[in-house]
Image: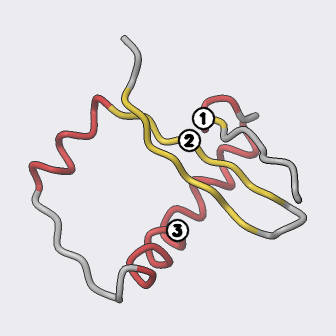
Amino acid sequence: MAETKRPYGIADLDYQAQQRIEAMKGQLLIALVNRLGGSLEMPVEEVDGTGAFVLFMGADEEAKTFSFRVERKEW
């Protein structure tokens, strides 16, 4: 069984890695919407309400997968 890798925040990455993530955000959104059936409607209020959350990302090079997890921020 593959070792579970700890997801990390984008801020934990070096500048170059952050730039690669920024460049692929559009691709990630397309892949997400495709995974959800190719169409998605979301209220503006839901997007505006994300300030209390943080997105963690991970990558498993061996499995060639990304992992994403949303958690509530610890104030």
Image location of residue 14, percent across then percent down: 76, 34
* Element at label 3: helix
Whether label 3 touches label 1, CB < 8 Å = no
Q: Which residue is mark 3?
A: 28
37 vs 1, left or right, is left
Crowding near the residue tagged with mark 3, few <14, some 14–19, many ≥20 C-alpha atoms within 10 Å: few
Mark 3–mark 2 Cα distance, whole angstroms, equals 14 Å
Horizontally, residue 19 falls left or right of residue 56, namely right
Q: Where is 21 relative to 32, above or below? A: above
Residue type highlighted by circle 1: Gly
Closer to us: 23 or 52: 52
Upstream in sequence: badge 1 or badge 2? 1
Look at label 2 and name its amino acid: Phe
Residue 9 numbered mark, or none: 1
Q: Residues within 10 Å of mark 1 (few under 14, many from 20)?
A: some
For image coordinates 17% across by 65% down, the residue present is 42
**What residue did someone put label 2 on?**
56
Residue 54: percent from left, percent from top? 43, 35
Quarter containing the N terminus: bottom right
Q: Residues within 10 Å of mark 2 (few under 14, many from 20)?
A: some
Front of the two marks 3 and 2: 2
